[in-house]
């Protein structure tokens, strides 16, 4: 079990996991397909016993903004100044196995490899408590509705 590179064949499972975990914050398959096409080195799935049980998507973006939920990007901005953790979703059976902590380490490595010194994200569904334990701090309201928070951390 562990994180591996996402492929196009994973997209149906990725979309289903997003819907199951995120509810109203889930995104359509087109969003994941585009992120995979635009920045494949930031797209991963958590594989457990030959089953995909989680997803992780990250890419360069602007530090002070977050992509609109469910929107296609068109391109990675040439003037991106931060690494954006777009999405992580883990099915309940993966929790407590270190997948979230491993995802944080993976995103830090990806950000560092791409030359970025910080990571931003929007926490939803109460996830800000987890992200705080991973070194992120709340910056402001997240812009995706009540109870969402933009968060930031530097790359060690």
Image: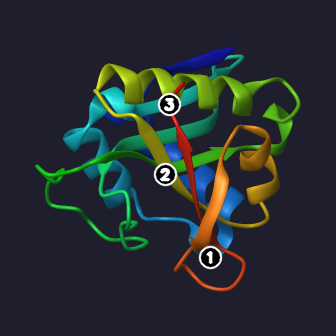
CA–CA distance in space, label 3 to label 2: 10 Å
User: Is residue 127 visible in this depiction of the protein?
Assistant: no
Judged from the image, the secondary structure of the residue bearing numbered disc 2 is strand
First-in-chain label (1 vs 3)? 1
Above or below: residue 22 compared with residue 48: below
Looking at the rendered image, the disc whose residue lies closer to the viewer, 3 or 2, is 3
Image location (x, y in percent) of residue 20 = 69, 59
Above or below: residue 1 compared with residue 117: above
Image location (x, y in percent) of residue 67 = 36, 66
Q: How many residues crowd mark 1 within 10 Å: few (<14), some (14–19), many (20+)?
A: few
Q: Are marks 1 and 3 in contact (CB under 8 Å)?
A: no
Q: Quadrant of residue 55?
A: top right
Identify the residue shown where x is 22% and y is 50%: 80
Which residue is disc 2 drawn over? Answer: 120
Identify the residue shown where x is 40% and y is 70%: 70
Q: Is residue 94 left or right of residue 76?
A: right
**Of 97 and 52, which appears nearest the observer?**
97
**Of 51 and 18, which appears nearest the observer?**
18
Judged from the image, the secondary structure of the residue bearing numbered disc 3 is loop
Q: How many residues crowd mark 3 within 10 Å: few (<14), some (14–19), many (20+)?
A: some
CA–CA distance in space, label 2 to label 1: 21 Å
Which residue is disc 1 drawn over? Answer: 24
């Amino acid at each position: 079990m562990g994180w591996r590179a996402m492929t196009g064949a994973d997209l149906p499972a990725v979309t289903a996991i997003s819907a199951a975990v995120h509810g109203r914050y889930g995104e359509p398959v087109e969003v994941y397909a585009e992120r995979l096409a635009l920045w494949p080195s930031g797209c991963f799935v958590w594989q457990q016993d030959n089953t995909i049980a989680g997803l992780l998507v990250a890419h360069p973006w602007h530090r002070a903004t977050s992509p609109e939920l469910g929107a296609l990007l068109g391109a990675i901005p040439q003037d991106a100044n931060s690494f954006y953790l777009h999405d992580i979703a883990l099915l309940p059976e993966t929790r407590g196995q270190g997948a979230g902590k491993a995802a944080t380490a993976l995103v830090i490595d990806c950000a560092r490899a791409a030359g970025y010194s910080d990571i931003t994200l929007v926490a939803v569904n109460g996830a800000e408590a987890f992200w705080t334990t991973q070194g992120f701090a709340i910056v402001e309201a997240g812009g995706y509705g009540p109870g969402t928070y933009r968060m930031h951390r530097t790359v060690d």
